[in-house]
Image (tube, rainbow, N blue to C red):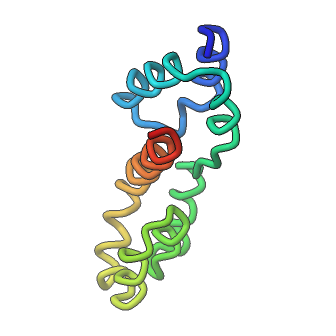
Amino acid sequence: MDAQKVDMYMMMNSKYFESYHLNAVREKLSSLDDSKSGIVHSLQFKEPTTALIISIFGGAYGIDRFYIGDTGMGVGKLLTCGGIGIWAIIDWFMIQGATREKNMQIFQNALY
């Protein structure tokens, strides 16, 4: 991809990744040929803010973890009622980072 397309993609999608992932994403996009750019633009990332809102209102039932695709932890939270509420509260602070990590996994799996 050319530099202008990479910059536009980074501007539109940087909120979906952790700040320390942005250089790796930029490098991978720069090294892609144009035939794979369609794959990159068709990726569906999860919104970290939406995950936080879901975590606040449904985190005790694991809905936030199901939303980001972390079904094992979602089942664990569901069966323990969010770790008797403690796990649910901890996830209020950690779910956005977990969502961004899952988005990076989606990006890597699509291109590697």
Q: Quadrant of the N terminus?
A: top right
Which residue does the image show at 46% across and 47% down from the upper left? Answer: 109
- Tell me: residue 67, above or below residue 93: below
Q: Is residue 108 left or right of residue 41?
A: left
Q: Nearer the viewer, residue 35 or 26?
A: 35
Which one is in front, 30 or 13?
30
Residue 55 coordinates in the image, percent (x, y): 49, 66
Rendered-image quadrant of the C terminus: top left
Give x and y (percent) for residue 9.
Answer: 63, 24
| Residue in the picture at 49% in, 18% down | 31
Side (left or right) of 47 relative to 76: right
- Above or below, comparing residue 37 to residue 2 in the picture: below
Q: Nearer the viewer, residue 90 or 66?
A: 66
Residue at 46 percent across and 73 percent down: it is 59
Q: Residue furthest top?
A: 3
Quadrant in the rendering for residue 92 = bottom left
Image point (34%, 83%), residue name: 76
Residue 40 appears left or right of 110: right
Q: Is residue 95 positioned above or below 20 on the image?
A: below
Q: Quadrant of residue 50?
A: bottom right
Residue 68 on image: x %, y %: 51, 61
Question: In the displayed image of the protein, which residue is found farthest to the bottom?
Answer: 79
Residue 12 position, x and y percent, is: 65, 27
